[in-house]
Amino acid sequence: MPPTMTSETSTKNRTQIHAARKGIITEQMRYVAEREGVDAELIRSEIAAGRLIIPANVNHTRLEPMGIGLALSCKINANIGNSATTSKLDEECDKLHHAVHHGADTVMDLSTGGDIPAIRQAIIDASPVPIGTVPIYETLTHVKKVEDITVDLLLEVIESQAKQGVDYMTIHAGVRKAHLPLVAHRLTGIVSRGGSIMAQWMMAHNEENPLYTHYDELCRIFQKYDVSFSLGDGLRPGCLHDASDAAQFAELDVLGELTQRAWDHDVQVMVEGPGHVPMDQIQMNVERQQKICREAPFYVLGPLVTDIAPGYDHITSAIGAALAGWHGASLLCYVTPKEHLGLPNKADVRDGVIAYKIAAHAADVARRRPGARDRDDKLSHARFTFDWNQQFALSLDPERAREFHDETLPAEGFKSAEFCSMCGPKFCAMSITQQIGDLAQAENAEN
Amino acid sequence: MPPTMTSETSTKNRTQIHAARKGIITEQMRYVAEREGVDAELIRSEIAAGRLIIPANVNHTRLEPMGIGLALSCKINANIGNSATTSKLDEECDKLHHAVHHGADTVMDLSTGGDIPAIRQAIIDASPVPIGTVPIYETLTHVKKVEDITVDLLLEVIESQAKQGVDYMTIHAGVRKAHLPLVAHRLTGIVSRGGSIMAQWMMAHNEENPLYTHYDELCRIFQKYDVSFSLGDGLRPGCLHDASDAAQFAELDVLGELTQRAWDHDVQVMVEGPGHVPMDQIQMNVERQQKICREAPFYVLGPLVTDIAPGYDHITSAIGAALAGWHGASLLCYVTPKEHLGLPNKADVRDGVIAYKIAAHAADVARRRPGARDRDDKLSHARFTFDWNQQFALSLDPERAREFHDETLPAEGFKSAEFCSMCGPKFCAMSITQQIGDLAQAENAEN
């Protein structure tokens, strides 16, 4: 009997990469191939090579599988989750709904307070997109102090989350004890929550990072449920000043090593990246990650290209994200307008998601992916022919486009009017051009 | 007696470039040098070479002179102005105030309806920043049909605006009759209002563009008041599909010729550019303009890097503007969220201006201008030390930063709290890093 999905999933290693390397095209691979209009065999071979992942926990039953990697379109992640001081379960499920409605391809639940497992279960049960977590956050809620975290507790929390159906987990295994002195010269030290928790633990115990020392055990848990690693960059820069420094790149070297070790276990892996990076350093950052991590998908947070615009960091970071996506990042983690100031509400989630849909799409266009510009061209055609309803329908946020148009010209008749509120009915650049086109055609016919 | 400002301004040619080429450092040059912390002689020599302009009409009495050119920081322009269907004088002055308050370096009054001269006079009288116009808009209001425009009317309107104190004017002299067939293959034809007016005029009369044929007369008017040319790109692409095509570059070649002709008259000139351009074509576009127009300052509109986000085009275009600024554009014309949908209100002006302050600043940082990152570093330091009031003060939009912070933690005590709403008081990445820093210092002291 040839190997089938059923026989495959009953073995210990249930990951997509394990199947891919055995030459099996899973139903998840087929689903992703169909979604993106590419060949299923391409998906399989890219997964086998580690260049593409399908984060699909075997226990995430509502999941509609999606893929992350350079062979596919650029994807975006939205973070939700409460903090110790704010937010409730219903609100988080509402944010999930909003994030997915507006186009988030994956969602991370970063809750740090309240009944974290219950919030997570509700989010997984409701979510058609992969759900990611940072298990160290929940771990911390089970102890009084960071130093009280034990290896057993860590593994227990991670396995319980894996069992719940979490599709990918940020694991800060790359921050090593030897790296800590490297952050001393920094302007903003360690800004990653997970990174600083691990740092504090290492300082308190004078021991190596337990996520690093017990990495193989994590791999074995991940094999069972097909959890994908999202290798956290605990030493990512927190400001332009600290970008591309020795601490960041020392950790990146470890992430390259951990990528290979995950692959040795047939576990899927993507790698997280900065953060805050001036525009002229972004391409170099992406290329360095791609080289050191042997083309494992790169998952970047922004990066923000300036630090002076709190309240608008969805924009400062969308600029960096667009550049990162163009140069080879596969997943862009959104930043909302509330970044550095507070937790995002529903409106912030919408603004963040759309800013990142823009960045990802602009990256796809700049990479000249086949068909990437089709939607632009269709919308431009609708614009030229004054087909307002079609313009709205093709927009990333049809509700907002319609709402803005209706602010000045609300009546339904204006949806087919051959002018808009910018020029008014007497004169319109678009309609003049149509006349020029007609005249040019007539002249051509004469000649 | 050596030449002084007084003797100079009493001659016929009162432009900054005329003075610069005579070796004179004007008070405007001194003012700009002081504002930007550079040598006044550098300003003079850059103006003499045509690489920098100070748009400063001799009749714009309230002006605080500013400079546009690669030797200085990247600048941004905000468009205001009513249309035939909307908006009033008070509203436009209010928009001017908002644009300048939030950081616009120059403002264009693009009014196309109502009492245009009165609106313009009020704006000039109130404005400390250079005011630009597109005189063909007013010209069109004096006739029934585009074809009725005469050369005399054009020159009369332009001179009357010059006399009023307009600092720079968009002149669509580069669209030539021979270019029109080149737009036939386009998806969105001619989207520049000025460009399509000139095209319609040329088609109706079967004659060359009067702004091109009477260019020397324009130069003589501009000499008298020191109006700077903003050479309009009437054939700029209106969508990604049309970017970098034959029509666009045919006009660019003419703009290069017109730049030289303005310089021959000792008239200041900058050159306008696209529009809608995929990210991977932006650097090429800037470099081509700089070459063909011999480093005359480049003034770009965005460009938008995707067409699918109406309602968010301040973001799609800020991405392109940041890239353009990095690669050598000197002035970035903002786009508001209402672009393609309606006329901007005050909130839109604010969103557009801040998005472009971000783009211009990110460009300055990426160009590694001396001191460009100082404000980022100061804000990052305030962030690291939990100095919230200082963070707000250093922000591009302090009001919004404070408002967002206060949504979750409004009490004044939280402005000095060593935590924020993201992590809460129990755990905070920033404060852990400070502990790590302290420990590292202590360890260093021991060793």
Image (cartoon, coloured by chain):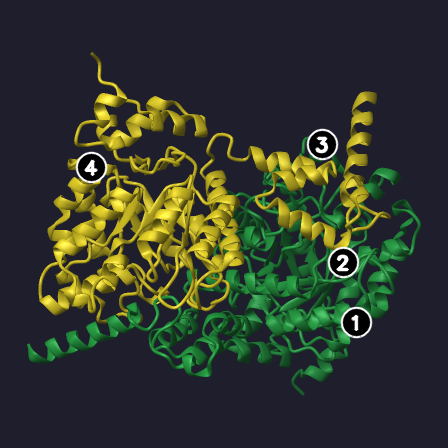
Chain colours: A yellow, B green
CB atoms at circles 2 and 3 under 8 Å apart?
A: no
Give the residue pinned by disc 4.
Answer: A223
In the picture shown, does residue A300 fall above or below B71? Answer: above
Q: Label 4 marks which chain's residue?
A: A
Q: CA distance from mark 4 to mark 1?
A: 67 Å
CB atoms at circles 4 and 2 under 8 Å apart?
A: no
Q: Quadrant of the C terminus of chain B?
A: bottom left
Q: Quadrant of the N terminus of chain B?
A: bottom right
Residue at the farthest top position? A1
In the picture shown, does residue B145 fall above or below B27? Answer: above
Question: Quick check: can you spot residue B283?
Answer: no
Q: Is residue A150 left or right of residue A396?
A: left
Question: Quick check: can you spot residue B292?
Answer: yes
Q: CA distance from mark 4 to mark 3?
A: 58 Å
Give the residue pinned by disc 1.
Answer: B90
Location of residue A150 by image quarter: bottom left
Amino acid type at circle 1 is Asp
The image shows residue A290 at horizontal and vertical percentages of 28, 43
B410 and A296: which one is in front? B410
Q: CA distance from mark 4 to mark 2?
A: 65 Å
Which residue is painted at 84% across and 47% down in the image? A425
Give the residue pinned by disc 2.
Answer: B134
Give the residue pinned by disc 3.
Answer: B184
